[in-house]
Image: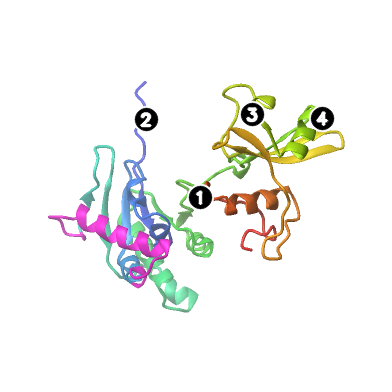
């Protein structure tokens, strides 16, 4: 029995998706992409500045200009690659449903909705889906019987699977913990077998009531003690904050990323 041909959809992107990832139009496989002209108008407000959104807006404009060479943006233009679909800019205009009238306000979100709704009426044999990072816009779309979804490409689905930069080691030889406290460091071999160690990793070493905070220093090749020290009057309250301060103040560490729930001291 022949394999069923995959349904080719049309995804309509809103401004939030472009500002999140400028090359998002290349990430929808063989499906087609609609870009409401309202999105281009909104992106114009983000061209200047050094914020990541400003960068994404400028790069998207460059990408669109490159892809549309020799074409009219009102026609379906092939995206680069044999497995890619096509894209076009959706001109303004209302279909049978006018979201601005329904929601009582003419604003960019509603004009984007109208563009997607009109495309859905014109392309009755195709599934049209609005893609937006704005949850309220997704809810409005669904209330008008327009399928909508989040842009999830590149999003971490399970935060707990991320590398945390720290590890807790239990049942450590008390002599090793004592040596770290007394000498300030121990040989990596005292804790790890060859190939097991991760450079710049932070460690919580435990054995019963004995414990120590430590750091794998790739420069010295040793596991060094990490002290809870205040900085500008700021005192770390737990091991994670202690590690964060140590990493930020370490000139050998060029980039520090932090993840945590609200109230854990990331901004400070």
Nearer-N-terminus badge (2/3): 2
Other residues around mark 3 within 10 Å, as few (<14) / some (14–19) / many (≥20): some
Q: Residue furthest front?
A: 183
Q: Find disc 4 in the rendering and name its residue.
A: 174
Residue 255's x, y, as percent? Answer: 51, 50
Nearer-N-terminus badge (2/4): 2
Magenta-drawn segment? 45-74
Label 4, label 3: how far apart the Cα atoms are? 16 Å
Q: Which residue lies furthest to the left in this view?
A: 70
| Mark 3 and mark 1 residues within 8 Å of each other at the beta carbon | no
Other residues around mark 1 within 10 Å, as few (<14) / some (14–19) / many (≥20): few
Is residue 98 among the parts visible in the rendering?
no
Q: Find disc 1 in the rendering and name its residue.
A: 255
Label 4, label 1: how far apart the Cα atoms are? 33 Å
| Mark 4 and mark 1 residues within 8 Å of each other at the beta carbon | no
Residue 188, disc: 3
Name the residue rendered at 34%, 33% in the picture: 5
Residue 56's x, y, as percent? Answer: 36, 59
Residue 61, disc: none
Asked if residue 47 is among those painted magenta in the image, a careful observer would answer yes
Label 2, label 1: how far apart the Cα atoms are? 48 Å
Nearer-N-terminus badge (2/1): 2
The secondary structure that most of the magenta stretch takes on is helix
Q: Look at the picture and state if 12 lies above or below 115.
A: above
Residue 4, disc: 2
Q: In this view, does 187 lie to the left or right of 89?
A: right
Q: Which callout, 2 or 4, points to the residue nearer the camera? A: 4
Q: Look at the picture and state if 223 lies above or below 75.
A: above
For numbered disc 2, what is the local secondary structure?
loop
Name the residue rendered at 50%, 62% in the picture: 134
| Mark 4 and mark 3 residues within 8 Å of each other at the beta carbon | no
Nearer-N-terminus badge (4/1): 4
């Amino acid at each position: 029995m022949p394999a069923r041909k995959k349904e080719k959809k049309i995804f309509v992107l809103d401004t939030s998706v472009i500002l999140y990832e400028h090359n998002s139009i290349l990430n929808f496989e063989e499906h087609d992409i609609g870009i409401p002209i309202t999105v281009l108008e909104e992106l114009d407000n983000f061209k200047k500045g050094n914020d990541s959104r400003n960068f994404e807006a400028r790069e998207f404009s460059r990408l669109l200009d490159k892809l549309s060479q020799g074409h009219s943006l009102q026609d379906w233009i092939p995206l680069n690659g044999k497995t890619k679909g096509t894209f076009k800019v959706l001109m303004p205009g209302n279909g049978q449903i006018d979201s601005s009238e329904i929601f009582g306000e003419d604003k960019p979100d509603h004009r984007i909705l109208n563009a997607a709704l009109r495309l859905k009426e014109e392309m009755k044999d195709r599934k049209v889906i609005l893609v937006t990072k704005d949850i309220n816009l997704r809810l409005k779309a669904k209330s008008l019987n327009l399928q909508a979804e989040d842009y999830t490409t590149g999003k971490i689905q399970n935060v707990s699977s991320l590398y945390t930069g720290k590890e807790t080691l239990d049942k450590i030889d008390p002599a090793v913990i004592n040596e770290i406290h007394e000498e300030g460091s121990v040989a990596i071999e005292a804790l790890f077998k060859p190939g097991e160690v991760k450079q710049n990793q932070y460690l919580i070493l435990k054995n019963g009531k004995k414990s120590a905070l430590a750091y794998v220093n790739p420069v010295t090749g040793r596991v060094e003690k990490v002290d809870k020290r205040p900085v500008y009057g700021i005192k770390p309250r737990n091991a994670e904050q202690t590690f964060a301060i140590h990493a930020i103040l370490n000139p050998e560490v060029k980039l520090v990323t932090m993840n945590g729930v609200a109230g854990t001291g990331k901004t400070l």
